[in-house]
Amino acid sequence: MNRASRSGPVGVILSVDPDRFAEVVAAARRAGLTVTSEQEVLGSLSGTIEEGRIPALKAVDGVESVDRDRTVRLPPPDAPIQ
């Protein structure tokens, strides 16, 4: 299944201007982001948003980057090297 055929919200991680954190978070919510975690000291937050709303999220003043939330699975430490 490719990204274009996905439906529903996708997970994203945002890097934002830490000096304007609360203002940028509020604007991101207005753009359609459902915030699931805030790390104000780091200037980042995560959440979910509809795929088609990602360009609007990237356009929010103070949003420095938007990356998809990805899951990385590692083999157990005793697994053979692949």
Image (spheres, helix red, strand yellow):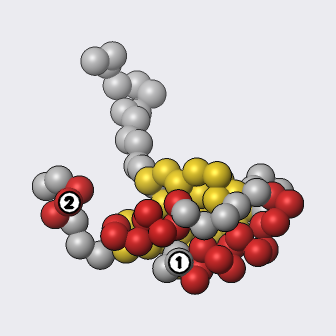
Residue 11 visible to an observer of this rendering: no
Q: Please tell me in which quadrant of the rendered image residue 39 appears.
A: bottom right
Q: How many marks?
A: 2
Q: Residue at x 20, y 60 (%)?
A: 4
Q: Position of residue 58 (x, y in %)?
A: 53, 60
Please, what is the three-letter code of the amino acid marked with disc 2?
Ala
N-terminal of the two: label 1 or label 2?
Answer: 2
Residue 5 rendering spot, x and y as whole percentages: 16, 63
Q: Residue at x 44, y 63 (%)?
A: 55
Q: Quadrant of residue 82?
A: top left
Above or below residue 6? Residue 17 is above
Residue position for label 1: 31
Secondary structure at numbered mark 2:
helix
Dot 1 lies on which element?
A: loop
Mark 1 is surrounded, within 10 Å at the Cα level, by few (under 14), some (14 to 19) or many (20 or more) other residues, namely some
Along the line of sight, which residue is nearer the eye, 10 or 53?
53
Q: Residue at x 22, y 65 (%)?
A: 6
What amino acid is labelled 1 in the image?
Ala
Q: Which residue is the site of mark 2?
A: 4
